[in-house]
Amino acid sequence: MTQEQWSAVDSYLTDHVVGTDPVLDAALKASADAGLPAINVAPNQGKLLHLLAVIHGARRVLEIGTLGGYSAIWLARALPAGGRLISLEADPDYAEVARSNIVRAGLTDVVEIRTGAALDTLPKLADEGTDPFDLVFIDADKSNNPHYFDWALRLTRRGSVIIVDNVVRGGAVIDATSDEPSVIGTRRLFEQISTEPRVDATAVQTVGSKGYDGFLLATVTAEV
Ligand code: SAH
Ligand code: DHB
Ligand code: MG
């Protein structure tokens, strides 16, 4: 199996069940034009996030790692009237690109992008006494995944959903000797979840236009 084949199959799947959307296409073009790395979720993955939010009836979503706002648009479009998505982004230039993509998407009343390192902005969110989030999408610097998962638990409720992107990274996750901070962070996250009584989780490997990776899906089973 080759990357070419995974991409061709992704194109086929996306053509049939995802389709194209001028606003999402424009968000990716504006992101590329501004020099952002193309590390957004793939269209069919964005649609998966969207459908999970719809199925869950999410009203409040927290995203850690905005980039150009591509996954934020997918998730925000899943929310009912009055729904809210807060997305955290460390890079102010990326956040500006995302804001303008959100404006083009007509989602300014739904999406709020907060700039700053997430480990600084998460405590502020908690201090504000923000209502619990129904769904959290963790997709920032993988070295901090254990901390982000802790924060996700603090900012959710029983029944909330937590999704973590990029937990396989070409299979690197099983390399116990890796000195890559992203691998170490994700392995710590798995160790943490293996003994965490407040969540019920699974993780799934994926292939496609974004290569060989995977995501983790958890639901909060206890009041936190
Ligand atoms: N969710 C996006 C992709 C996010 S890429 C999508 O699928 O469309 C990861 C993002 O996390 C990058 O934009 C990066 O700048 C941001 N990031 C990295 N470290 C961070 C930190 N400490 N706090 C917040 N965001 C961070
Ligand atoms: C990277 C980050 C992501 O969130 C992703 O989906 C793919 C790659 C990265 O930092 O390389
Ligand atoms: Mg990602």
Image: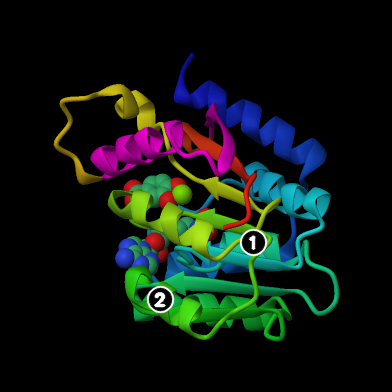
**Among the two numbered marks 1 and 2 on one chain, the one whose residue lies closer to the N terminus:** 1
Horizontal side of 146 relative to 200 (left or right) equals left
Q: Amino acid at mark 1?
A: Asp
Percent coordinates x, y for residue 92 in the rendering? 36, 81
Residue named by callout 2: 123
Question: Does residue 21 lie above or below 207 as drawn?
Answer: below
Residue named by callout 1: 25
| Relative depth, front residue between 73 and 32 | 73
Horizontal side of 59 relative to 183 (left or right) equals right
Queried on whether the Cβ of the residue with tag 1 lies below 8 angstroms from ligand 1, the answer reads: no
Percent coordinates x, y for residue 41 in the rendering? 54, 49
Q: SS class of the residue under badge 2?
A: helix
Q: SS class of the residue under badge 1?
A: helix
Colouring scheme applied when the structure was drawn: rainbow
Percent coordinates x, y for residue 64 in the rendering? 47, 63
**Residue 35 showing in the rendered view:** no
| Relative depth, front residue between 219 and 183 | 219
Which dot, 1 or 2, sits closer to the camera?
2
Horizontal side of 160 relative to 51 (left or right) equals left
Q: Amino acid at mark 2?
A: Pro
Q: Residue at x 42, y 34 (%)?
A: 195
Residue 115 drawn in magenta: no
Q: Residue at x 35, y 33 (%)?
A: 191
Q: Which residues are magenta?
A: 182-208
> Could you say which quadrant of the image residue 72 lies in?
bottom right
Farthest residue in the top direction? 1
